[in-house]
Image (cartoon, helix red, strand yellow):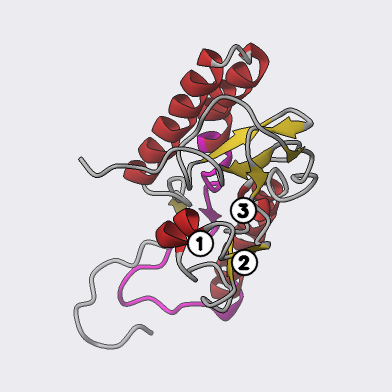
Amino acid sequence: MWGTKNWGELIWGGAGGPIPLLSPPGLLVLAVLLLGGAVVVLRHRHSTLAITLSAAVLVIPLAAYAGSVMLPNTFTNGTIADADQVNANFSALAGAVNDNDTRIGDLSSVFGADTSMANAGTGSECTLGQVWLTAGVLGSGVPAEGQLLSLQQNQSLFSLLGTLYGGNGSTSFGLPDLRDAAPNGLTYVICIQGAFPQPL
């Protein structure tokens, strides 16, 4: 029995609501970032990529929610909890957790593979340290893959990044490695030759 105190009713049955892997504010930030990226890409006349990013606003939040849990047994205060019934409830919870692991795996498989598709290139002037996604085989910048750059040849960029991403700070410094964060088929590039940003 669940003791002699008045514990109230233990609700072990019924369908639980979806358990968000991202909070609603987190999903809102994700949607804003994706839509912002779509607008920037559209301004550069890449309508196919813009449509893809816009579609992700709908797809990713749906994938980011876990399934509901249906527990088979309900227990009330003052009654004996049968071990088989309790175990059945925990088995249902374990199945739901394992299903969530699969959902997370499916979502994470969208990122981090085939993300070094673009080679370094030049284009319109950019701002030092600026990072963006490219779908082309040439990026208007250097792929952000954690590589080390010569400090002597890139002093302005070093003044912005320092050794935050690696390097010894005397002869070299590192770029961020964004391969795992890039959607499959796209490449994050970083501007290493461009205008120095000015404070507001």
Q: Where is residue 142 in the image (x, y as percent from the top left)?
A: 66, 45
Residue 73, labelled with which disc? 1
Tag 1 and tag 2, C-beta contact below 8 Å? no
Instruction: Please give the residue where the numbered disc 2 appears in the rendered image.
Output: 94
Q: Which amino acid does label 3 sit on?
A: Leu
Q: Which of marks 2 and 3 is in front?
A: 3
User: Quick check: 167 above or below 137?
Assistant: below
Q: Of residues 94 and 168, which is closer to you in this image?
A: 168
The magenta span reads 61-84
How many residues crowd around disc 1 within 10 Å: few (fewer than 14), some, or many (20 or more)?
some
Residue 11 located left or right of residue 150: left
> At x 19% / y 78%, what residue is drawn?
6
Q: Of residues 199 and 84, which is closer to you in this image?
A: 199
User: In this view, which residue lies farthest toward the front?
Assistant: 152
Q: Where is residue 128 in the image (x, y as percent from the top left)?
A: 47, 44
Of labels 1 and 2, earlier in sequence is: 1
Under circle 2, the secondary element is helix
Residue 146 located left or right of residue 200: right
Q: Quadrant of the N terminus?
A: bottom left
User: In this view, which residue lies farthest toward the bottom?
Assistant: 3
Q: Where is residue 116 in the image (x, y as percent from the top left)?
A: 77, 46
Q: Which amino acid does label 1 sit on?
A: Asn
Q: Of residues 128 and 70, which is closer to you in this image?
A: 128
Count of number-bearing discs: 3
Q: Quadrant of the C terminus?
A: top left
Snapshot quadrant of residue 96: bottom right
Q: Distance between the residues labelled 1 and 3?
A: 47 Å
